[in-house]
């Protein structure tokens, strides 16, 4: 039996008194030492999100520091090449720093200041969450430490260099798979021991409930802008509208869809299917994964036969995560959103086509979403509209792209 979405209730508030979405996903599965800091942060955010002065301050920095609104453009050449649906892109990669992670980083730094904290820590996989947090920390005068898997440090060199230039310390994580899942774990361990003086910024809509809520509340700026841009373009929200977004932890998709929740727009989330010649992937929603606990929340998560967190593989560091936001688990089971996966190879093909035809160069994360749009568009009518969230630029992936394709288009 599918779960129900309550009308008129924001997506982040669809949970019950135990912070569980649909009674199945999310929650606060945390050690006793984190109960007070989690409760304190929950109470603080509950007040701030309703505080007109804080919202005004947020909007000021979104406009003057991040550079909102980001562009909404029609991909004329891609549309003509494929035929079928009209294809548009919300080019969130034009935000300061090159990705949607800047929204969450900015809000967390503002919250840290309100909480009287002078030190902020965060996790990163693709390096964008770390890069943005280091940027925002520098902007607001906070000391910053970033936890990043050793594997990701090697494959996301441009963002690593940017983090260091912004004055943040990078802590290499050499345990486990040395990717995002391990970075989140190590960052949370550090916070447990230092939560009295340190503010923690989880880089996506994962973790204990308050971090899911802060992140999704921050990235909702994407859809707040997009609703107005779509109405300006079409005069109304089209009946046949598909909003396609890559999904790893799920922060950009949550923000992309938020303001369209009560419209007829179709949500399509695209997970990382991994290499075609491998059984490994990072797509728990499209591969029948079971519910488990990861980083303090119940969610669909890739597991081995013993129920331990399973191995993942993806060309995209930002999607290379064994779990998924409780919000997306809820959207899947409520049937409000559909999820599929795209292979490494098809994501590269999509990058190649989009960067060749259009004046955008998507990172490997949104390239997964573009691959799904490329697959769907020719099957649809010209009256139908696809919008892809181009949530990150390809600069961080230039070494991988050069190695795999033999060239790189910026």
Image (cartoon, rainbow, N blue to C red):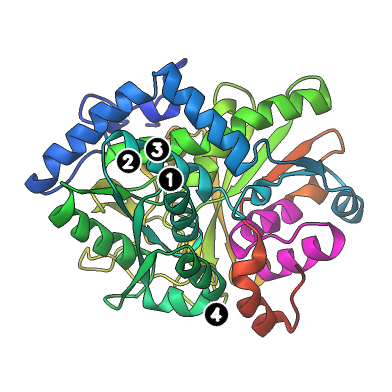
Assess disc 4: are there few (<14), some (14-19) or many (≥20) residues with their C-alpha within 10 Å of its C-alpha.
few
Tell me whether the residue at label 3 lies in contact with that at label 2, contact meaning CB atoms closer than 8 angstroms: yes
Q: Which residue is mark 3?
A: 110
Does dot 1 land on a helix, a strand or a loop? loop
Assess disc 1: are there few (<14), some (14-19) or many (≥20) residues with their C-alpha within 10 Å of its C-alpha.
some
Q: Main secondary structure of the magenta part?
A: helix
Please report the bounds of the magenta region as a residue range: 347-375
Sequence-wise first label, 1 or 3? 3
For image coordinates 41% across by 56% down, the residue present is 284
* Residue located farthest toward the left when viewing the structure as drawn: 32
Tell me whether the residue at label 4 lies in contact with that at label 1, contact meaning CB atoms closer than 8 angstroms: no
Distance of label 2 from label 4 (alpha carbons): 45 Å
- Image quadrant in which you'd find residue 110: top left
Per the rendering, the mark at residue 365 is: none
Q: Nearer the viewer, residue 19 or 188?
A: 188
Does dot 3 land on a helix, a strand or a loop? helix
Distance of label 3 from label 2 (alpha carbons): 5 Å
Does dot 2 land on a helix, a strand or a loop? helix
Assess disc 2: are there few (<14), some (14-19) or many (≥20) residues with their C-alpha within 10 Å of its C-alpha.
many
Q: Which residue is mark 4?
A: 277
Q: Which residue is mark 1?
A: 140
Q: Which residue is mark 2?
A: 112
Camera sees residue 239: no
For image coordinates 27% across by 60% down, the residue present is 187
Q: Nearer the viewer, residue 172 or 362?
A: 172
Does dot 4 land on a helix, a strand or a loop? loop
Q: Please identify, in this view, whether the residue under mark 4 or under mark 1 is nearer the observer.
A: 1
């Amino acid at each position: 039996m599918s779960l129900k979405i309550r009308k008129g209730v924001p997506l982040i508030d669809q949970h019950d008194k135990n912070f569980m979405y649909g009674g199945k996903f999310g929650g606060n599965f945390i050690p006793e030492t984190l109960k007070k800091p989690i409760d304190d942060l929950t109470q603080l955010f509950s007040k701030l999100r309703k505080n007109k002065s804080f919202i005004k301050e947020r909007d000021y920095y979104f406009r003057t520091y991040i550079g909102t609104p980001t562009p909404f453009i029609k991909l004329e050449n891609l549309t003509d090449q494929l035929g079928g649906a009209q294809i548009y892109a919300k080019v969130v990669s034009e935000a300061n720093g090159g990705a949607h992670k800047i929204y969450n980083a900015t809000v967390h730094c503002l919250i840290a200041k309100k909480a009287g904290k002078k030190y902020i820590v965060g996790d990163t996989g693709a390096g964008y969450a770390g890069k943005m947090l280091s940027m925002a920390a520098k902007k607001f005068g906070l000391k910053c430490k970033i936890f990043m898997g050793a594997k990701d440090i090697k494959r996301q060199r441009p963002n690593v260099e940017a983090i260091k230039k912004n004055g943040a310390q990078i802590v290499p994580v050499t345990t486990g798979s040395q990717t995002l899942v391990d970075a989140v774990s190590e960052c949370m361990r550090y916070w447990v021991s230092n939560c009295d003086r340190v503010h923690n910024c989880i880089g996506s809509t994962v973790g204990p409930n308050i971090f899911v809520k802060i992140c999704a509340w921050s990235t909702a700026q994407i859809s707040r802008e997009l609703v107005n841009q779509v109405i300006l373009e079409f005069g109304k929200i089209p009946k046949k509208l598909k909003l396609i977004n890559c999904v790893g932890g799920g922060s950009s998709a949550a923000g992309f869809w938020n303001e369209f929740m009560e419209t007829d727009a179709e949500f399509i989330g695209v997970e990382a299917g991994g290499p075609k010649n491998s059984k490994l992937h990072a797509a728990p929603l499209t591969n029948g994964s079971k519910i488990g606990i990861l980083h303090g929340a119940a969610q669909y998560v890739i597991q081995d036969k013993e129920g331990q967190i399973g191995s993942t593989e993806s060309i995209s560091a930002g999607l290379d995560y064994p779990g998924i936001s409780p919000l997306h688990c809820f959207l899947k089971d409520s049937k409000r959103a559909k999820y599929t996966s795209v292979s490494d190879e098809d994501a590269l093909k999509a990058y190649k086509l989009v960067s060749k035809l259009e004046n955008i160069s998507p990172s490997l994360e949104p390239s997964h979403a573009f691959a799904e749009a490329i697959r769907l568009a020719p099957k649809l009518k010209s009256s139908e509209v696809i919008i892809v969230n181009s949530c990150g630029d390809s600069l961080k992936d230039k070494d991988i792209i050069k190695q795999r394709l033999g060239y790189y288009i910026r």
